[in-house]
Image (tube, grey):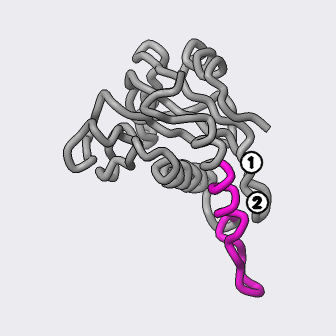
Amino acid sequence: MLPYGLTLDHISDSVRATENYFNSISVAPGAPHILDLMPKSAISSLVSDAIIYYLEINCHQLIKNELASGYPDLLPKSGYPNYAISNGALGIEVKASTRKSAWDAHNPSAGWVLTVAYISAGTQVVITEVCIALLSVDDWNNSPRKSGSRRTHTARINANGVAKLRLGKVYSL
């Protein structure tokens, strides 16, 4: 069962709208396509933002977290005043990646996670898989930075969390 009134139609409509958005970006003659200019991590962020945008439009019970770095990304409309929370227990976190099993976050958190796997080739973005599951803190592994590294501390969904997400596959090409 999907949370917060979310349906399979909301998800598939949001996938199509996201793909259409990226695939309709026009390019001036002689100019590079925006996807050719962006690092992969920025494309993943943009895919996540587009899915969030279209899920908010398609599922009237969810709204984007207005806090830029807030968790989770989508909030139930009845959950928080002003639709802004820095670290909430209610809602859905959205993660996009070109990989189907390696999703990172800044902190391990319990809650609903929706993952989006996609392919970015030239001027096209194709979403290949969407999974959703209720994860616990135990479904994450901490990845502290190594001595001398400037990398940000992250957490990655572990094999148990990936298995939960696989059971919650709601879209696949």
Question: Marks 1 and 2, how far apart in space?
Answer: 8 Å
Which secondary structure lies at badge 2? strand
- Circle 2 Cα neighbour tier, 10 Å, few/some/many (<14 / 14–19 / ≥20): some
Instruction: Name the foreground residue: 25 vs 98.
Output: 25
Instruction: Name the foreground residue: 53 vs 161.
Output: 53
x, y percent for residue 153: 41, 34
Instruction: Name the foreground residue: 129 vs 12.
Output: 12
Which secondary structure lies at badge 1? strand
Instruction: Please give the label number shown on residue 124.
Output: 2
From the viewer's perspective, is 66 left or right of 100? left
- In the rendered image, the quadrant that contains the C terminus is top right
Decide which of tag 1 and tag 2 comes sooner along the chain. Answer: 1
Amino acid found under the numbered disc labelled 2: Gln
| Residue ID at (71%, 85%) | 28
Residue 74, quarter of the rendered image: top left
User: Is residue 138 part of the magenta span, yes or no?
Assistant: no
x, y percent for residue 122: 78, 62
x, y percent for residue 5: 46, 33
User: Is residue 22 part of the magenta span, yes or no?
Assistant: yes
x, y percent for residue 93: 45, 36
Residue 159, quarter of the rendered image: top right
Residue 170, quarter of the rendered image: top right
Instruction: Please give the label number shown on residue 119.
Output: 1
Residue farthest along the bottom direction in this orientation:
29
Q: Are marks 1 and 2 in contact (CB under 8 Å)?
A: yes
Amino acid found under the numbered disc labelled 1: Ile
Q: Which residues are magenta?
A: 15-35
